[in-house]
Image (cartoon, grey):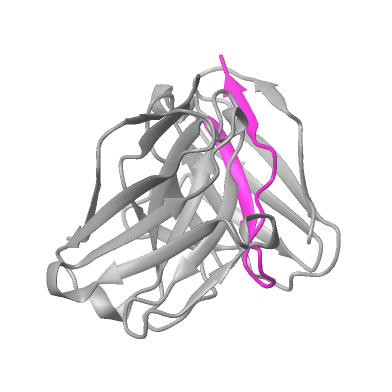
Amino acid sequence: QALLVQSGAEVRKPGASVKVSCKSSGYNFINYYIFWVRQAPGQGLEWMGWINPLSGGTNYAQKFQGWVTMTRDTSISTVYMELNRLKSDDTALYYCARGNTPFDSSGSADTWGQGTLVTVSS
Amino acid sequence: DIQMTQSPSTLSASVGDTVSITCRASQTILTWLAWYQQTPGKAPKLLIYKASTLESGVPSRFSGSGSGTEFTLTLSSLQPDDFATYYCQQYVSFPYTFGQGTKLEI
């Protein structure tokens, strides 16, 4: 059974960076895209982008281009999402999620991490 | 970006009821639509993909329909665990945008 386990909560000051990890298990890591989605407190879901664990290729929503970086380490089946130049409105739960179709960047997400709360406060 | 609009934003119902949630896309998305359920403090859970295909393990009282720009999620014979927030999501065009959510409450 596929499982995604994310790193723990983080607190950062405005202008700082944060790097969240997402470790995969229970399936072939390189076969499925990983998506990142965030949710501000009491708000809806916002799509950030994806990473192809096989090639390392990425695609970011335009809003996040230039200040988000998604990477992966295939040796430990882990993907990372780094967000730079944090602002207070970046305070949110950040989720990683697995695409439900192998080798396909276009799809729904069938497995989700537990979420990582990132708090940005001075 | 494709805009996804759900209605209603809040829906009141009782155990045993049948309810429907509508999701409209700002342009055609064919059937590239998913529905998710989220309970407080938990990650979203995939219910339906490709507009009407039930995810493995999801009870058959959940059903999805529609194509093009208008879609419906129907919940039959509501159970206590069904009271949650529901989101639609299109994945035909990047970024894969979500609706604003529909909160189903008792």
Q: Residue at x 41, y 22 (%)?
A: B80
Find residue A86 and report its horizontal and vertical position in percent. 54, 39
Find residue A24 and report its horizontal and vertical position in percent. 21, 61
Looking at this view, name the residue that lies furthest to the front.
Answer: A15
- In the image, taking residue B2 as reference, residue A7 lies left or right, namely left
- In the image, taking residue A99 as reference, residue B77 lies left or right, namely right
Which stretch did the figure color magenta?
B85-106
Q: Residue at x 40, y 77 (%)?
A: A52
Find residue A101 and report its horizontal and vertical position in percent. 41, 76
Is A101 in front, or is A32?
A: A32
Q: Residue at x 50, y 33 (%)?
A: A92
Is B25 in front, or is B67?
A: B25
In the image, residue A25 above or below residue B79: below
Q: Which quadrant, please, contains the N terminus of chain A? A: bottom left
Looking at this view, name the residue that lies furthest to the top.
Answer: B106
- In the image, taking residue A96 as reference, residue B31 lies left or right, namely right
User: Is residue A20 something that shows in the picture?
Assistant: yes
- As for residue A106 lying within the magenta part, the answer is no
In the image, residue B44 above or below residue B13: below
- In the image, taking residue A54 as reference, residue B54 lies left or right, namely right
User: Is residue B54 something that shows in the picture?
Assistant: no
Find residue A48 and report its horizontal and vertical position in percent. 56, 56
